[in-house]
Image: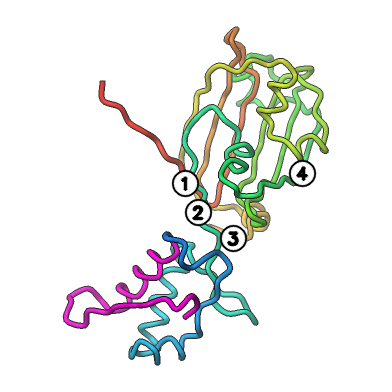
């Protein structure tokens, strides 16, 4: 195995051997001993090194593939994928959070145009149905891999946004630069299966689990300045919340 990773097995333990192997590989990934892009020995070599059967090794690797820690690539072998993005729930943009975490954010703008506001979004933004608003759709990457599909609706005239701006800076940074003073947001987090279009953009299988987030942001006057509906790859992304007793 790469990085001379040591696997210590307790053959007298009731814990299945495949699970012992999988957990020790997962811990090595978390520690950084196995960096993103590292390749594992093929199943035959790994089974021989550990004195285990090939089906046991295959089960351990499949377990880690299902958890999103490893990926099988034709002609390459089994590799460690980029670590999962963990994000605190704060009034920040995903772009800024990724940049602070060293995840090399990149953005592909899929839509940037005035549109008639969707019926369900009109009351959220406090406008009449049929009103034109600015619609954004973006594909966000982290460390070169697709991470999220972002949909946003904003009142027209709030900020002059260009494709070049949105590909190089986060939406909240651009709004603040335009003088928008965002103060509070309501957010709802959920989960659902990926549609065919989402799966294609995010390089997932159709029906793969996605995290969903609905967020409406208000300025210091209480006006809704942005509504977002986003989906994230559950295998690459999680949200962290600190709970405080009152």
Pointer 4 with pointer 1, Cβ within 8 A: no
Left-right relation of 119 to 18 = right
Q: Position of residue 77 (x, y in %)?
A: 57, 79
Is 8 contained in the magenta span? yes
Residue 220 lies in what quarter of the image? top right
Q: Position of residue 27 (x, y in %)?
A: 38, 64
Pointer 1 with pointer 2, Cβ within 8 A: yes
State the residue at coordinates (45%, 78%).
4
Single out the mark in the foreground, 2 or 3: 2
Q: Earlier in the sequence, mark 1 or mark 3?
A: 3
Q: Earlier in the sequence, mark 4 or mark 1?
A: 4
Q: Position of residue 221 (x, y in %)?
A: 60, 7
Single out the mark in the foreground, 4 or 2: 2
State the residue at coordinates (72%, 27%).
174
Label disc, if present, on residue 84 of the rendered structure: 2
Label disc, if present, on residue 238 of the rendered structure: 1
Q: Earlier in the sequence, mark 1 or mark 2?
A: 2
Pointer 1 with pointer 3, Cβ within 8 A: no
Q: Which residue is mark 4?
A: 110
- Image: magenta residue range: 1-29
């Amino acid at each position: 195995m790469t990085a001379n990773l040591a696997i210590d097995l307790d053959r007298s333990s009731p814990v299945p051997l495949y699970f012992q192997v999988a957990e020790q590989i997962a811990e090595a990934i978390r520690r950084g001993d196995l960096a993103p892009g590292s390749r594992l020995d093929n199943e035959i070599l790994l089974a021989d090194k550990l004195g285990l059967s090939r089906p046991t090794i295959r089960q351990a690797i499949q377990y880690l593939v299902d958890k999103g820690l490893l990926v099988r690539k034709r002609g390459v072998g089994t590799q460690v994928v980029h670590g999962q993005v963990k994000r605190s729930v704060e009034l920040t943009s995903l772009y800024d959070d990724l940049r602070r975490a060293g995840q090399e954010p990149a953005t592909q703008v899929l839509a940037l145009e005035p549109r008639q506001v969707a019926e369900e979004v009109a009351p959220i933004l406090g406008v009449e149905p049929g009103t034109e608003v600015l619609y954004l759709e973006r594909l966000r990457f982290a460390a070169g891999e697709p991470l999220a599909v972002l949909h946003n609706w904003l009142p027209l005239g709030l900020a002059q946004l260009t494709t070049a701006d949105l590909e190089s800076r986060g939406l909240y940074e651009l709004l603040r630069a335009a003088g928008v003073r965002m103060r509070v947001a309501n957010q709802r987090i959920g989960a659902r299966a990926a549609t065919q279009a989402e799966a294609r953009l995010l390089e997932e299988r159709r029906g793969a689990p996605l995290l969903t987030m609905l967020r409406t942001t208000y300025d210091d006057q209480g006006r809704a300045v942005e509504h977002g509906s986003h989906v994230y790859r559950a295998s690459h992304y999680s949200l962290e919340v600190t709970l405080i007793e009152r």
